[in-house]
Image: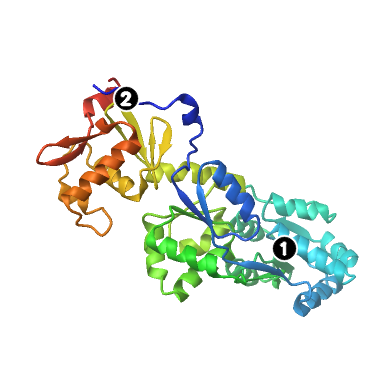
């Protein structure tokens, strides 16, 4: 009898929850920080920045709106992003308007969408704001609608996408609204990484796709449409590719496209990393016991007794197919259907099974059933008790 070859303890400790998974990043800002955090959890990361944020410090429309606010101070100010609010203050400073601009805002009721925005307000010397615990624009709107709005002047700092629901509701309540677009988004100068990522998603070659801003989600879907890949991308994101957004505002364009999205409880980059690390294995990993070993089949490899091994694309496809039918005998023709090109002959299947056994470290995991095919050495009674 061949002894089960279990990896040593330290090897198991090095296997992150995302080992074997490829995660796509559409973010531009902080993408390397985000990617490094995912890599520390074991992921392979591919970058396809979907947007480039351009400040509008030289925008005549924003400058005129700033002057108008100084001349006619608003009653209510809604700030939706820290980068946008800071950018507006910095632009006002470059125009020599910062002091009167902040003075005009100081007399208004201040609503901030989240703690980062609160921090930006405090840094500018503005206090007394209200902020929702959910960091949700919908909760900000609910708060707005509890205020007396008839005849009031409301300023809404946008987050890169128009806040149509909020603006329309506030106007319907009798307020006049100024929409401040403090930055605009454009496609990055080099779109090749974005185009590659779109193709990878369409083909199911990534396991998760992450978004940290609503404009990036809009841009990604628009790019897929322009490439003629939107149907394939949406199909992949509804089935084998997990879409993950940092918060509800970011998720909204995806949800409108009927794409399911996972989100962290708090809209933070670190929380998004944790959500992906928890949700992706829970959704995609196949777990099975065979020949005394615990196997977890992931995107591009297998965790065997806590150690990650890579049988290659063919071997991973074979073990995944065997694990879908634990204990059942699969013919060489059935297994050959998952080999490159499909319909591989018996010899090619035998060679691929041999390489798979070598990668797994114990040939007993995959048993040969003479004249019939192969089966995963699965014993449901042993699996249920955990005894061998």
Counting the numbered discs, the total is 2
Residue 258 in view of the camera? no
Judge left or right: residue 226 versus residue 176. left
The mark that comes first in sequence, 2 or 1, is 2
As helix, strand or loop, the secondary structure at mark 1 comes to helix
Specify whether 236 is left or right of 35: left
Q: Give coordinates of residue 118: x percent, y percent.
A: 74, 52
Q: Nearer the viewer, residue 57 or 158?
A: 57
Q: Is residue 334 above or below residue 230?
A: above
Tag 1 residue:
84
Image position, residue 58 (x, y; %):
79, 76
**Residue 137 sits in quarter:** bottom right
- Between residue 231 and residue 307, name the one nearer to us: 307
Residue drawn 22% across the image and 50% down it: 348
Residue at horizontal 17%, vertical 39%? 328
Asked which colour scheme the image uses, the reply is rainbow
Classify the position of the N terminus by image quarter: top left
Residue at the disc numbered 2: 4
Residue 284, percent from left and from top = 38, 46
Q: Is residue 209 left or right of residue 155?
A: left
Q: Nearer the viewer, residue 119 or 342?
A: 342
Vertically, is 75 above or below 288?
below
Q: Is residue 248 above or below residue 192?
A: above
Spatial CA distance of label 2 from label 1 is 58 Å
């Amino acid at each position: 009898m061949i002894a089960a070859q279990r990896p040593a303890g330290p090897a198991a400790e090095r296997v992150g929850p995302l080992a074997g998974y490829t995660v796509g990043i559409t973010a531009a800002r902080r993408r390397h920080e985000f990617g490094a955090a995912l890599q520390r959890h074991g992921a392979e990361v591919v970058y396809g920045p979907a947007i480039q944020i351009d400040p509008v410090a030289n925008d005549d429309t924003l400058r005129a709106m700033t002057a108008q606010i100084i001349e006619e101070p608003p009653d209510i100010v809604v700030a939706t992003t820290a980068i946008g609010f800071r950018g507006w203050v910095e632009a006002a400073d470059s125009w020599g308007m910062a002091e009167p601009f902040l003075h005009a805002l100081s007399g208004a009721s201040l609503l901030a969408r989240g703690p980062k925005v609160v921090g930006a307000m405090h840094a500018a010397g503005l206090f007394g704001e209200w902020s929702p615990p959910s960091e949700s624009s919908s909760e900000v709107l609910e708060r707005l609608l509890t205020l007396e709005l008839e005849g009031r002047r409301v300023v809404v700092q946008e987050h890169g996408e128009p806040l149509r629901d909020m603006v329309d509701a506030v106007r319907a309540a009798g307020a006049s609204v100024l929409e401040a677009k403090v930055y605009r988004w454009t496609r990055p100068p080099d779109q090749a990484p974005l185009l590659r990522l779109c193709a990878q998603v369409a083909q199911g070659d990534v396991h998760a796709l992450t978004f940290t801003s609503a404009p990036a989600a809009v841009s990604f879907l628009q790019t897929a449409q322009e490439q003629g890949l939107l149907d394939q991308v949406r199909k992949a994101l509804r089935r084998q590719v997990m879409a993950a957004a940092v918060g509800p505002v970011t998720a909204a364009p995806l949800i409108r496209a009927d794409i399911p999205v996972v989100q962290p409880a708090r809209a933070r980059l670190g929380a998004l990393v944790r959500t992906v690390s928890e949700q992706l294995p829970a959704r995609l990993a196949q777990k099975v016991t065979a020949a005394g070993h615990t196997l977890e089949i992931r995107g591009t490899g297998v965790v065997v007794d806590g150690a990650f091994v890579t049988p290659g694309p063919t071997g991973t496809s074979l073990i995944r197919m065997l694990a879908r039918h634990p204990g059942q005998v699969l013919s060489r023709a059935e297994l050959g259907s998952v080999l490159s090109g499909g319909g591989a002959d018996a010899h090619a299947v035998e060679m691929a099974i041999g390489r798979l056994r070598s990668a797994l470290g114990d040939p007993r995991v995959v048993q040969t059933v003479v004249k019939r095919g192969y089966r995963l050495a699965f014993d449901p009674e042993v699996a249920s008790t955990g005894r061998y």
